[in-house]
Image (cartoon, helix red, strand yellow):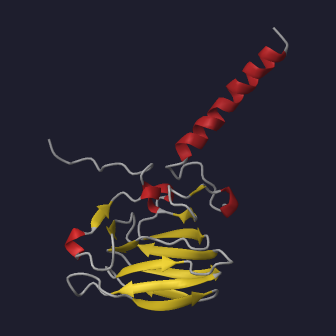
Amino acid sequence: MTGPCFISFFLLLNLLPFFQTLEASHCSIKGLPLVRNIADLPQDNYGRGGLSHITVAGSLLHGLKEVEVWLQTFAPGSRTPIHRHSCEEVFVVLKGSGTLYLASSSNKYPGKPEEYFIFSNNTFHIPVNDVHQVWNTNEHEDLQMLVIISRPPIKVFIYEDWLMPHTAAKLKFPYYWDEQCFQVPQKDEL
């Protein structure tokens, strides 16, 4: 038995374990090299136009327990939702510029946020549960940031506006980039 059909079948049989490994490794550290090229990591906008999100190192994708690292790029005019989370967050602005809006969580609702202009080579952190939004207010250039969070996977509370009460914010968990790999923990009971 020779010819194109046999060769195709032979290639498929030999490549099948490779494709199974690719599928299995999306949500598992098994088979992932220690050193990875960022360009080879999956990126998506998760239905948010103008966003490019890459989980560089994550809890669900890579087995990290204390921190998670993202590379996020925002096209001109795009932004995060107004939100808060019960973890610390650190940003390093790699390129571009924009605006950070930050409000305290000490009142019943966020209220008018403070504005901070952010530029390439800036770094800033968001205190636990402080309501914030990052916006690429630059009309001509992408805003690209390295983002580090503590206590992953992240639980995000989303606000419709800055006057929405904290108790009315909507929980999004698992967050969009964790949905595919998140598994409900098994209960340890009968």
Q: Residue at coordinates 36% horizontally, 75% vertically from top-left? A: 87
Q: How many marks?
A: 0
In this orientation, which residue lies closer to the viewer: 14 or 123? 123
Residue 49, position as x, y percentages in the image: 55, 61
Q: Quick check: 83 left or right of 186?
A: right
Q: Residue furthest left?
A: 190
Q: Residue at coordinates 48% horizontally, 78% vertically from top-left? A: 134
Q: Residue at coordinates 44% horizontally, 50% vertically from top-left? A: 181
Give the quadrant of residue 150.
bottom left
Compared with 26, 38 (above or below) is: below
Residue 165, position as x, y percentages in the image: 22, 76
Give the quadrant of residue 20.
top right
Q: Visible in this render: residue 79?
A: yes
Compared with 125, 18 (above or below) is: above
Quarter of the figure that contains the C terminus: top left
Q: Quick check: 13 left or right of 65?
A: right
Give the quadrant of residue 41.
bottom right
Residue 58, position as x, y percentages in the image: 49, 63
Quarter of the figure that contains the N terminus: top right
Q: Residue furthest right?
A: 3
In this orientation, which residue lies closer to the viewer: 47 or 129? 47
Q: Quick check: 31 left or right of 85?
A: right
Residue 39, position as x, y percentages in the image: 69, 60
Q: Residue at coordinates 64% horizontally, 30% vertically from top-left? A: 16
Compared with 139, 173 (above or below) is: above
